[in-house]
Amino acid sequence: MRVPVEDPSRLRAEPPRRVSPELRAVIEKQIAELLEWDVIEESHSPVSSAVHLVKQRDKVRFCVDYRHINSATTPDRYPLPRIDDVLESLRGARWFSSLDAIRGYHQMDVAEEDRWKTAFSTHKGLYQYKRVPFGLRSAPAYFQRFMDGLLGPMRWITALVYLDDVVVYTATLEDHISALQQLLSAAERAGLRFSPAKCTFAVQELNLLGRKVSGHGLGVMEDRASAVLNLEPPTTLRELYHVLGLFTYYRQFIPRYAQVAQPLTDLTKGWSYKKVGTAHRLVNAAGDFVSARTTPIPWKESQQEAFDALKRAIASPPTLAHPDYTRPFLLYTDACKSGFAAAVHQVSVFPDDAVAVAAPAWPRHLPDLDRQQWIAAVRADPVFGPTVRRLEKGATHGEDETYTLDNGVLVRRDDGRICAPRACLLSVLRRLHDDGGHFGFAKTYMRAAADFWHPRLSSLVAAYVRYCSVCLRTKVGRNVGRLDIDQDADGPFKHISVDVILGMPRTRRGFDAIMVGTDVYSKMILLKPCTSSFTARDVTSFILDRMVRVGWRPQRLTSDHDLRIMGAACEQLGQTIGMTVTATPPHHHQANPVERHIQTLQRVLRAMVATHPGSWDEEVVPAAELAMNSAPSLATGMTPFDAVYIASPRVLDSILARPDHGGVGEWAEHFAQAKARLLEARTLIRAERARQRRSLEDRTAPLPVLSPGTQVWIRLRDRPIGSAPSGKLAPRKLGPYPVRRVLSDHRVLVDVPAELNIGAEFAVSQLELHPSGADPFERSAVVGRPASPPRPHPSVLAPPAADPVPALPRRGSRTRREAPVLRKVEHGAPRSAPYSGTPTP
């Protein structure tokens, strides 16, 4: 923010003002806080302003008297929104939220070259503002411009701002959530922070700019209306001006205001203000200067009657409906000797069965809660009890800005929400969440926050939903995953994957399956026709003939749980050549790299086998292998042949009959080009894998860190279990069960009941964490069995545990793993036998 001064010579240095020891302590405290917040700094400015402390009810506000600075400042005329325009824009809205910026001005910077102009003097020394202070002439315009820019296209559509007060208004709850997300995202990008204690989200009635706004229209805030009843009659001219200002602010809620208030307005006749220098002085009819503070007013019975009538009108105001510009208006006019008036009306036609319903003080959707028990619980609550006792001792409305008592129920003044004691929240949340459809945190919190308030309402609602046994069984969380590219192979045939395609038509030579091997690095695929009754010796022969015999030494083999591939024979081969054998968890095909190539291979075979149905093993398989290894990769632009061999076959060379492949040159040049090509392939593969990891991280949640004893749920969608209930309305998870052993970051063994008849190995992505810690509402599920249905509602006074809301496990932390014990598996064991291989490192 700039502070443009027309004539700097007009600025002066003011000395610090003398204050009492009590106020001196206030100044010292404020200076310390402003320094800690990095709002001010020490100054060497040639000018200074004096500190001015303003008492506001139960606190003292720290201000600086910038009048001599403001008189020399070029004003910024950016307009503030009119209050009536703001209120009129809420027409048609049903959901409201209000947000208040934390020390709004202090979040904006003052231009470094203008900071010396903001200097102020105290007994502690000379300081100047680094952030925008209160009291500068152009500060409201600057801040309003910034906030309007923050709202962007939302302004006057779904959101409005008046200085540091932001209101979001929409017709539907879904639009409201979207508008809040858009606003908070814009505030986060701009670095603007809001005060949680002063924010109200997703309510259907809100106090805004001295009005009570709702979907029905505009009303008067209850505390303002009740405070007016205690208003004393004015005795001086200054008090009369204050009273008339209050009544005029609410005149739209007072029928025939001018006529009713005429005895009071008549008392102001003959008085006027005249500007003298920079001040305005009160002048009487004779032209003499008088003081409004000490000038008495004649008070008669007519003034008292008018005063009482105006108070009654504000204490029981009507709700003013928003105009509907799609329907016609009716204009009523009237005039008499003493004045004239006009009123615009709209007539609403309701169905014959429509009835008028008064807004209840007790929530309509919770009629079974005992009011007297609720009041007793509030008095016993450690958070609200002291406030209730203080108010019951005779505190007036003006002495507590936050709370009031409504027939014994503690209510917040700003939004009318009921203060919910900790002992009653269990019953409230059971009604709102369990009986309300088991919605998630956002909708449950919005329903609770519409009528109730508690300082920890958000965390308590989150804990209630997180530990709900029904939600744990019937809802599936976000998928988890992590791509460990640091374990990727950095060369051809260091990591291989093997599988078998079954169900092929039988050829004349008796083959009905294809053994598939792939190099994970280059994506080269190797094929061999076989029978569906292949043995482990066939697998080891395939690896030896097609890979090891030509010079490759695989370091890692990955496949599924078929023991003919991952059994003792392959383990023995691995020990001989130094190869780690890794089995993927059941029903977790994405962990087996060859699966993706099998899908592509099946499309190629389906297209080529039509002309060779009985000889695909001789005619189609070699052609398919050559075609796939000659096809360029979309990630690298190279074929698998290019990424593996020094020289690869070219179709163009065959057509043109070039014996030297187009004149590439000698072997040394072949080798140099191949080396450069392989280095380029390695770089491109790493870049593509990094892109894949980012894409996976965008689509999934971080991989949880599990340890022995951790309770987990089985996601039936990712790990089907034949004995589990099935159907549209069946639970979607089973558990919770404890983790027995951690094989790697991606694989664990789980203690599952024997009656499930499944293996114990699971991929971490097939599981969900059970909430850690204790349920603060003392609900529990039987470990290892589906959770029992919710218990009947207890009394509203049944006290839940006072434990704090437990924190979720920290993600990303690693623990030492217990090394799994290897078990020997007999060759030729059935396919369903549990596999126990070397764990993934």
Image (tube, helix red, strand yellow):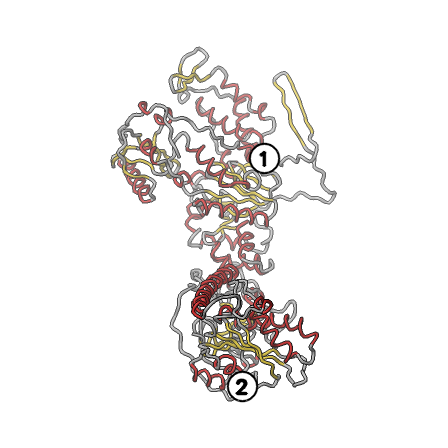
The quadrant in which the C terminus is found is bottom left
- Above/below status of 691 relative to 833: above
Q: Nearer the viewer, residue 599 or 724?
A: 599
Q: Nearer the viewer, residue 59 or 757?
A: 757
Residue 702 at x, y = what percent? 47, 63
Q: Residue at x 44, y 10 (%)?
A: 286
Q: Residue at x 40, y 29 (%)?
A: 137
Residue 346 at x, y = what percent? 68, 33
Residue 177 in view of the camera: yes
Label 2: element kind: helix
Q: Residue at x 52, y 85 (%)?
A: 541
Judge the density around disc 1: few (<14), some (14-19), many (≥20) Cα neighbours within 10 Å: some
Mark 2 or mark 1: which comes first in sequence? Answer: 1
Name the residue beneath numbered marker 1: 88
Residue 323 at x, y = what percent? 64, 35
Q: Amino acid at mark 1?
A: Glu
Which numbered tag is attached to residue 338? none
Q: Is residue 351 left or right of residue 445?
A: right
The quadrant in which the N terminus is found is top left
Disc tally is 2
- Above/below status of 234 relative to 806: above
Judge the density around disc 2: few (<14), some (14-19), many (≥20) Cα neighbours within 10 Å: some
Name the residue beneath numbered marker 2: 536
Q: Nearer the viewer, residue 152 or 612?
A: 612
Q: Is residue 119 left or right of residue 155?
A: left
Report how far apart the C-alphas of labels 2 and 1 lie in the structure.
Answer: 80 Å
Q: Amino acid at mark 2?
A: Ala
Label 1: element kind: helix
